[in-house]
Amino acid sequence: TSKISISVVITVHNEEENITGCIKTARYLTDNIVVIDTESTDKTVNRAKKAGAQVFSHEFTRIVEPTRNHAMTKAEADW
């Protein structure tokens, strides 16, 4: 049997208090963790990078679909 590859995609805005724990938990599933930051003004980006996630930016639109669609282009795994 072949192993299925999984990406975890996390969309954030000013989540410096939660992002490290979130990434740590996601590591139980995969090492392929993508964070889409929506113009945070705190330390979210730095903490996500330090935790080993791939971090990309997207404008803060308050609408889920554009950010989600951008995130899906960054995920590299099968699922």
Image: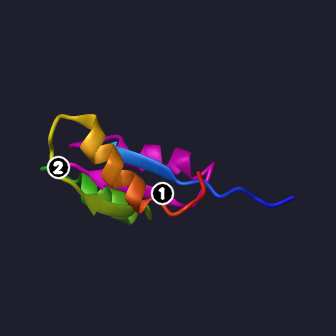
Residue situated furthest right in the rendering: 1
Q: Which residue is mark 1?
A: 33
Identity of the amino acid at label 2?
Answer: Ser
| Left or right side of 19 for 46 | left
- Magenta region includes residue 29: yes
Res 54 quadrant in image? bottom left
Look at the image and name its color scheme: rainbow
Which residue is painted at 39% across and 46% down in the image?
10
Q: Residues within 10 Å of mark 2 (few under 14, many from 20)?
A: some
Which residues are the magenta region? 12-38
> Relative to residue 74, is residue 65 depicted above or below?
above
Identity of the amino acid at label 1?
Answer: Ile
Residue 28: % across, % down: 63, 49
Which residue is painted at 15% across and 45% down in the image?
60
| Left or right side of 26 for 41 | left
Count of numbered tags: 2
Q: CA distance from mark 2 to mark 1?
A: 18 Å
Q: Which mark is residue 40?
A: 2
